[in-house]
Image (cartoon, rainbow, N blue to C red):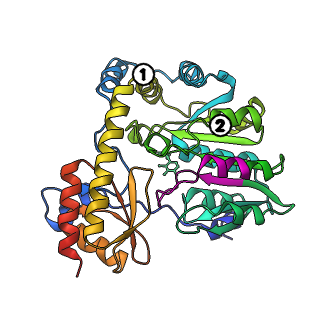
Amino acid sequence: MSISFRKELDELSAYKPGKPIEDVKKEYGLDEVIKLASNENPLGTSPKVTEALKSEIDNLAIYPDGNATLLKETIADNLNIKPTQVLPSSGSDEMVDMISKTFLDKEDEVIMADITFPRYISTAKMMGAKPVVVPLKDWTYDLDGMKEALTDKTKLIWLCNPNNPTGTMFAEEKLLNFLKEIPKDVVVVYDEAYREYVTREDYPHDSMKLLKEYPNIIIMRTFSKMYGLAALRVGYTMASEEIIENINKIRGPFNVNRLAQVAAISALKDSDFVNKCYEVNKEGKEYLYKEFDNMNLEYAPSETNHIFVNVAEDAQEIFVKLQKRGMIIRPITGTWIRVSIGTMSQNKLFIKLLKEVLN
Ligand SMILES: *Cc1c(COP(=O)(O)O)cnc(C)c1O
């Protein structure tokens, strides 16, 4: 006799993170290693957040507020919605998981793009639901294709705008036309992890107005990217009170830790930091575009803090060669890599090393 595991797990494998900087240093005997692989904020965190955290450090023995009341209220105030329409989570990662657990039964169909955020498909499989994968078109969401993929069994649709790892976006008009056509018993999850970086005006900058019109939409945001709090694991989600209430039923009682709550509240108040990060990212993006143009490398237009670029050689091999030189990026598919936009000196070093490794 031996124990058995849920058969859904046969379809899954554990998430493989990139090598940590310390491991790469040791392995190749390097003093300095730069990671442009995980879309982290190269400017770190707002100094105001660091200050706020110092005053909380003496309270580690005390459980966090399980309801995250103050954080919810701060978010709701900023967005002009009710606190009961907001649910913070331990990163958006946890929210993707909770949404799948809240809605998916076996045999339900879940529409998503390829290539996009990998947690959408893994959590669907985890629940025994059926992923229906619609390829990108020109590295952008094919919303018409996704609409055509609807069946009686469709339960959930994942939209990531702008998309990770391609950095591309779709315009507000396209989103509105899409939502109009989706039956109201299908849940649409709209992941805005990179919204703060978007430069284009035709982006749906005010997604909160969708909440009023569509009771079936869930909007996810995170503190991991623009706010530089990836280590603390905190994100937030907006939806109808009914949806929030139901997700809340499967939420762990203290899912957002005390430091994360304090940091998130403080981060939302420092718009100067956000503005600075936006400018540094925009400048870095323009620099990298210019260098890629000079090198004749094709890339997808990015509205995020990363660029999806065709290095015209095997991405995995380029990844290894760059890593040996102390530069970590993410190989994605074929000859395409994803590089996070860093500080200007990091961007320049990346270009220098990329030129070295390309034939
Ligand atoms: C980084 C990212 C998130 C946020 O992840 P966290 O768990 O909040 O760190 C969510 N969605 C996408 C598409 C991302 O790239």
Question: Which quadrant holds residue 354?
Answer: bottom left
In reply to whether residue 174 is colored magenta, the answer given is yes
Above or below 158: residue 247: above
| Left or right position of 302 against 27 | right
In this view of the protein, which residue sits in the foreground, 304 or 35?
A: 304
The magenta stretch spans which residues? 157-178
Looking at the rendered structure, the kind of residue marked 1 is Lys
CA gap, disc 2 and disc 1: 27 Å
**Of label 2 and label 1, which has the lower sequence position?**
2
| Left or right position of 186 against 112 | right
Instruction: Sort mark 1 into few (<14), some (14-19) or many (20+) by Cα contacts within 10 Å.
Output: some
Above or below 290: residue 265: above
> Can residue 172 be seen at all in this image of the molecule?
yes
Question: Which quadrant holds residue 155?
Answer: bottom right
| Left or right position of 248 against 311 | right
| Left or right position of 235 against 316 | right
In reply to whether residue 223 is colored magenta, the answer given is no
The N terminus, quarter of image: bottom right
Q: Answer yes or no: do the residues labelled 2 and 1 have beta carbons within 8 Å? A: no
Residue 344 placement (x, y as % from top left)? 22, 49
Residue 160 placement (x, y as % from top left)? 58, 52
Residue 221 placement (x, y as % from top left)? 54, 39
Residue 107 placement (x, y as % from top left)? 81, 63
Which residue bears the numbered disc 2?
Answer: 251
Which residue bears the numbered disc 1?
Answer: 269
Number of marks in picture:
2
Name the residue at 66% across, 68% down.
Answer: 134
